[in-house]
């Protein structure tokens, strides 16, 4: 056996990776009376509580407070604010991450009855997992029910010449900052890059976003991308789209980036937010006949990936969101415990990007609906032209767009962009999920003057 002999122990279930879904599944299985082992090589709880959703939303909240204070002059009189990063860093350290310590999460799992290992778990054949702890001890678990994979992803490094040797940041570094640079280049215009760009710019950092694709937020509707770029430019963020970084260098405390246009960008710091790499390369997938070089693990509607094997989270390719992982954990757990119920469906996956304005989307974009061969009708409205958008004043940018499958008369997708766009989305997510007839949505009473009343105008515009 690899690395010498290790003891073998029989248990019911082994969970490799304890992001939100894996942690919840291990807890639920243990509470259901199963003998559960949970393994994670980093922090129990995963990316979301320590480097993703929770600390970044504290950053966003702080940036929004600064932006609102600056709008006060137009709305309510003179206000002067001196921006300081110190309260943000303190909140992230003390309230969000407890100093990037997972003791509370580990104790919660153990209190539920699970065994927790900080170490590397690898498949060792069907229903078998070899765990190597940080101290070098090894144990092989033989799982009666099976194994759940929830390995998540890590920040990807794009193949830019010279980048590897430089002290560039990823999102994990950005949330741990205690002081801000004077200037920052962000490579990547997806949700992470866009949220970070706006936060840092609002705290006085000179920010440039370089996006290799043609627009920001490429997974969202083009209208939302265009409006967000307009807002960014108004806020002093430089946005470069359709541009590749060909070379990176770091010297004398500054980064120099060569662009394919021939321009050189210089900045104090560089943040790379150019996608994620699935953690499938060191899981022992080859021991159960799966491909360790794949981007995703194929799963069925019960999240089954093979004999005695389930996979949940980012690596299933159904959406790299905490809420998808949590949804999948519940479906997989019901399968593992024999409870049954409804299998997984992904026709109404929602998401929100917490820029200002927020960009919420659910289901299909117009382009995806057309690519799927549907008979598509769309309707849209400008949020700023609504009564609430008008009275809101500065910061009232936004739009609502709905995508209808005209043959069935139901919405298959929608976008809500604006103040609280992610909250307005809730209404649209119900409509897409429950396949509410558009004729029914037309006959509703919409409260006035709300932001969500723009949905009525977008539906009236369906053509």
Image (cartoon, rainbow, N blue to C red):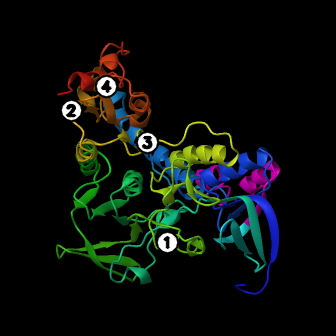
Cα distance between the residues tagged 1 and 2? 40 Å
Question: Circle 1 — which element?
Answer: loop
Identify the residue position indicated by label 1 in the image: 291
Q: Nearer the viewer, mark 1 or mark 2?
A: 1
Cα distance between the residues tagged 3 and 4? 19 Å
Q: Nearer the viewer, mark 1 or mark 4?
A: 1
Q: Note whether 269 is above or below 51 in the view shown.
A: below
Identify the residue position indicated by label 3 in the image: 349
Question: Circle 2 — which element?
Answer: strand
* Farthest bottom residue in view: 4
Using the image, tell me which numbered label, if any, was put on residue 341: none
Q: Is there a contact, CB below 8 Å, between mark 1 and mark 4?
A: no
The image shows residue 307 at horizontal and vertical percentages of 62, 61
The image shows residue 177 at horizontal and vertical percentages of 52, 63
Q: Note whether 459 is above or below 158 in the view shown.
A: above
Identify the residue position indicated by label 2 in the image: 377
Q: Is there a contact, CB below 8 Å, between mark 2 and mark 3?
A: no
């Amino acid at each position: 056996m690899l690395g010498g002999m290790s003891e073998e122990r029989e248990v019911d279930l082994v969970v490799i990776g304890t992001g939100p879904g894996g942690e919840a599944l291990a807890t639920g299985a243990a509470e259901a009376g199963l003998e559960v082992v949970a393994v994670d090589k980093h922090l129990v709880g995963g990316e979301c509580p320590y480097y993703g959703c929770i600390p970044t939303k504290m950053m966003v909240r702080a940036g929004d407070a600064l932006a609102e204070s600056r709008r006060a002059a137009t709305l309510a009189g003179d206000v002067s604010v001196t921006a300081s990063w110190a309260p943000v860093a303190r909140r992230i350290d003390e309230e969000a991450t407890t100093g990037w310590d997972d003791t509370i999460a580990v104790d919660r799992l153990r209190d539920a009855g699970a065994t927790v290992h900080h170490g590397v778990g690898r498949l060792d054949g069907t229903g078998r997992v070899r765990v190597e702890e940080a101290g070098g001890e090894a144990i092989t678990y033989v799982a009666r029910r099976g194994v759940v994979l929830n390995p998540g992803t890590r920040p990807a490094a794009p193949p830019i010449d010279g980048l590897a040797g430089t002290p560039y940041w990823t999102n994990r570094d950005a949330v741990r900052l205690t002081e801000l640079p004077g200037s920052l280049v962000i490579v990547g215009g997806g949700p992470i890059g866009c949220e970070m760009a706006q936060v840092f710019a609002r705290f006085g950092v000179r920010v440039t976003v370089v996006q290799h694709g043609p627009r920001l937020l490429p997974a969202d509707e083009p209208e939302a991308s265009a409006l967000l770029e307009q807002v960014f430019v108004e806020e002093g963020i430089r946005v470069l789209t359709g541009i590749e970084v060909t070379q990176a260098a770091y010297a004398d405390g500054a980064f120099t980036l060569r662009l394919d246009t021939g321009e050189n960008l210089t900045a104090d710091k560089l943040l790379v937010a150019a996608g994620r790499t699935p953690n499938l390369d060191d899981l022992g997938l080859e021991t159960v006949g799966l491909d360790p070089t794949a981007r995703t693990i194929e799963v069925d509607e019960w999240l089954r990936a093979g004999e005695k094997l389930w996979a949940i989270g980012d690596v299933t390719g159904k959406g790299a969101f905490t809420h998808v992982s949590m949804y999948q954990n519940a479906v997989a757990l019901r399968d593992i415990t024999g409870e049954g119920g409804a299998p997984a469906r992904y026709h109404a996956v929602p998401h929100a990007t917490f820029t200002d304005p927020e960009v919420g989307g659910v289901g299909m974009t117009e382009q995806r609906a057309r690519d799927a061969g549907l008979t598509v009708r769309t309707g849209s409205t400008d949020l700023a032209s609504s009564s609430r958008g008008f009275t809101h004043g500065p910061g009232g940018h936004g739009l609502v767009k709905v995508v209808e499958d005209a043959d069935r008369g139901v919405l298959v997708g929608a976008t809500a962009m604006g103040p609280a766009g992610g909250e307005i989305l809730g209404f649209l997510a119900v409509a897409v999920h429950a396949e509410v007839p558009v004729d029914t949505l037309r006959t509703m009473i919409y409260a006035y003057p709300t932001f969500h009343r723009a949905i009525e105008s977008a539906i009236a515009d369906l053509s």
